Amino acid sequence: MNINEIMKELAQYKRIQEETAEIIDGLTDQLKTYMTAHGIETLTGDEHKASYKTVSSSRIDTTAIKKDLPDIAARYTKTTETMRFTFA
C-alpha cells in the first residue's frame, strides 16, 4: 500500500469517526435533556446505566499565580516536550 492510499484510508475513517461522534453527542444530549426534565441523576435501562450530576473540583488558577507571584510561578513551571500528529 502506498502513502497516498494510507492517507486516503485514514481520511475515510476520520470522516466516519466524526459522523459517529455527532451521533453519540446527539444521543447523549437526548439523555441529558430527559434526565434534566425529569429531575433524574441516575437512569438505569435494561443493559446500561447513565448518570448526569454536578461534580465539584478544585484547581489552581495558574493565570492568577503567574500574575500575582511570577517568581514562584516560574520556579514551579515545568516544560515538557511531546510529539503531536496532525492530519488534515
Image (cartoon, rainbow, N blue to C red):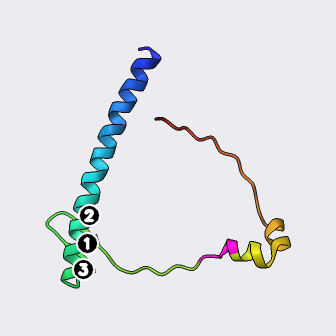
Mark 3 Cα-neighbour bin, 10 Å: few <14, some 14–19, many ≥20? few
Say which quarter of the image contains residue 7. Answer: top left
Task: Check whether the beta carbons of the residues at disc 1 and disc 3 lie within 8 A of each other.
Answer: yes
Element type at mark 3: helix
Tally the marks: 3
Residue 11 pos. (x, y %): 38, 31
Which stretch appears magenta? 59-63
Q: Quadrant of the N terminus?
A: top left
**Residue 6 magenta:** no
Report whether 3 appears left or right of 31: right
Q: Which residue is mark 2?
A: 28
Q: Residue furthest top?
A: 2
Secondary structure that dominates the magenta span: loop
Q: Which residue is mark 1?
A: 32
Task: Check whether the beta carbons of the residues at disc 2 and disc 1 lie within 8 A of each other.
Answer: yes
Q: Which residue is mark 3?
A: 36
Q: Between marks 3 and 2, how big is the CA–CA gap?
A: 12 Å
Q: Between marks 2 and 1, how big is the CA–CA gap?
A: 6 Å
